[in-house]
Amino acid sequence: MDTAGNNIIRIVVLGDIVGEKACDVTARLLSSIRRQYNADFLIVNAENVDNGGGLSPEDARLLFESGADCITSGNHIWDRKDYETLFELPGVLRPINYAPELPGSGVFITERNDKVLAVINAQGTRDMVPILNPFDHVKAAAEQIRERQNGKNLAIFVDFHAESFAEKEALAWYCDGDISALVGTHTHVQTADEKILPHGTGYLGDVGMCGVLDAVIGFNADSSVERARNNTNIPMTVAEGAIGLCGVYLEVKEFACKKIIPFVMRT
């Protein structure tokens, strides 16, 4: 990995963590991932840690203590009753376009070695719960961040938790040049559509997941087949087996994305 240039901001993003075991494995590997990529910042999406839905404050603390700088989420972050306690932890985000009276924040800003990372967490509305417009909220947040951080070595990263790839790609184009990178989460399937848009915004449709890769998006195959084949609503259980980590490495220079490299680590 090229380490030249102190003004380059290096970011590693890991996809949705599915299950407690995957959380433990991810936490154990965070420090080595930081070293491997010489990463300034580590971002993890952790909305599926608690048996596939939600995140406990204890697991959030484990991830932070192990090296995560920011924890993003999505629609499942509300699954546990103690989400208000969870949002008291700095760096735990919920999508910005939920109703403003709900607890939590959709923006987190952190700084290390004169490098500033702003993370915006948003959620899609196509084929998902209809919430507030993500386009308006992301654009406004990005503009406000750039105004307040003017003159600093800044990167703005967006975790867009969405089902529709058309919606993900459209938001990236809408914000091209206003954000450094947009990476999708939610489907648990890593895509191969990484690119850098004309005004410097990096894009990846979905980063994938951290969980059992030889399963159905991290869940037990038998229960997943039953649910899909017979159109039932039986609970899906987290799969057992070897854990894989799906992520993406980003390099940002002068606010623009210069590299976007997806990766998969099998443990």
Image (tube, rainbow, N blue to C red):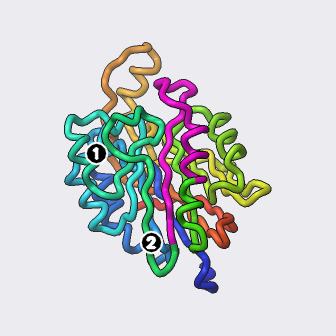
- Horizontal side of 183 relative to 48 (left or right) equals right
Q: Quadrant of residue 195?
A: bottom right
Residue 180 screen position, x and y as percent: 63, 59
Of the numbered discs 2 and 1, the one sitting upstream in the chain is 1
Residue 55's disc is 1
Mark 2 = which residue? 111
The quadrant in which the N terminus is found is bottom right
Q: Amino acid at mark 2?
A: Glu
Residue 118 screen position, x and y as percent: 50, 60
User: Mark 2 Cα within 10 Å, few/some/many (few <14, many 20+)?
Assistant: some
Q: Amino acid at mark 1?
A: Leu
- Horizontal side of 236 relative to 16 (left or right) equals left
Q: Residue at x 65, y 66 (%)?
A: 255
Q: Quadrant of residue 61?
A: bottom left
Q: Residue at x 63, y 69 (%)?
A: 252
Number of numbered discs: 2
Image: magenta residue range = 116-143
Q: Nearer the viewer, residue 2 or 8?
A: 8
Residue 251, relative to residue 244: is it above or below? below
Residue 114, relative to residue 107: is it above or below? below
